[in-house]
Image (cartoon, grey):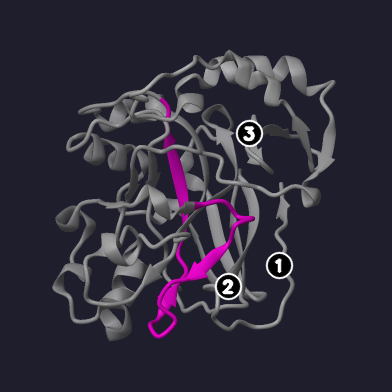
Amino acid sequence: MRLCRFDEGRLGVVDGGGQVRDVSAALEVLPTFRYPCPPYDGLVANLPAVVARARTLADRAAAVPLDRVRLLSPIANPGKIIAAPVNYQKHLDEVKSDVQIHSNNPAHTITIQQAGVFLKASSSLVGPAEGVVICKPERRTDHEVELAVVIGRQASRVAAAEALDYVAGYTIGLDISIRGSEDRSLRKSPDSYTVLGPWLVTADEIPNPGTLDLQITVNGELRQKSNTRYMILGVPELIEMASSFYTLHPGDVILTGTPEGVSPIEPGDRIVATVEGIGTMEVAVRAAEGGSEKARPAFESVKA
């Protein structure tokens, strides 16, 4: 099933005809939380019940064309956004060879096995309709397209052989990055620098996340194109690594790394990111309020 969040936090099922079926009534199966709220995403923690209820509602639910809704991040409340650096060998090679990317920081040129994973601020999260707002226009800011994994149940010290059992589903991730010498977590955590969308595809629809084509274009120009088979650490190994340090909770997101071809973006650009088995999302890049940008209309569209 493909579940999306749209407009003012409504829940939708995306059908094969490019329409959203409004199944917001399925949210009634969620338990009521009182302060202090749990450290996880309530919808993902109860995903089987939500999916079951959504199935009963979808056929007779009102249908709206995708191009008429504002798609939000399919995950509303991730406790953690975990990211994998240099997880494609050709990307590691381009980082090592380009001072504009590595900025003479030795930490940027070591392997993922040496570097481990890092955390991004949950406040950096947006959906495709919200777009990317350039934080530091005087500095180089790059796109990075990634497969994003959503954890479905609590996981601690999980072996790679069992790791996929803990996955709720997958979505497309954009890890937007300011280049510089600072720690990755700082440069990749400004508001809007983590884009997830266009929807969550439940894990049963993607039995093998290690064979997916992915690509990104900017203003129609192909910038990145690869396959998740070229990841150094696959999804199971990343879950094993992350869960050996942190307890993973429902709704936690793991960005699995980006292939070669990272390059600058600027206000006015249009990013189109595609991952096989998930779909395509289009994201606008704009200047911060009061800044300047190319004169283009603000819009967002997706393709299943």
Q: Amino acid at mark 2?
A: Arg
Mark 1 Cα shell of 10 Å, populated few (<14), some (14-19), many (≥20): some
Where is residue 56 drawn, in percent x and y? 74, 14
Whether residue 129 appears in magenta in the rendering, the answer is yes
Q: Residue at x 35, y 60 (%)?
A: 189
Callout in the foreground (2, 3) = 2
Which structural element holds mark 2?
strand
What separation in Å lies between label 3 and label 1 (alpha carbons)? 24 Å
Give, as a three-letter code, the residue at label 3. Answer: Leu
**In the image, which residues are magenta?**
126-152
Residue of label 3: 3
Q: Earlier in the sequence, mark 2 or mark 3?
A: 3
The residue at the point 27 percent across, 77 percent down is 180
- Are discs 1 and 2 less than 8 Å apart at CB? yes
Q: Pick whichever of labels 1 and 2 is earlier in the sequence.
A: 2
Q: Secondary structure at mark 1?
A: loop
Left or right: 129, with 44 as reference point: right
- Name which residue type carries label 1: Ala
Q: Under tag 3, what secondary structure?
A: strand
Q: CA distance from mark 2 to mark 3?
A: 27 Å
Disc 2: which residue: 286
Q: Which residue is mark 1?
A: 298
- Which quadrant, please, contains the N terminus? top right
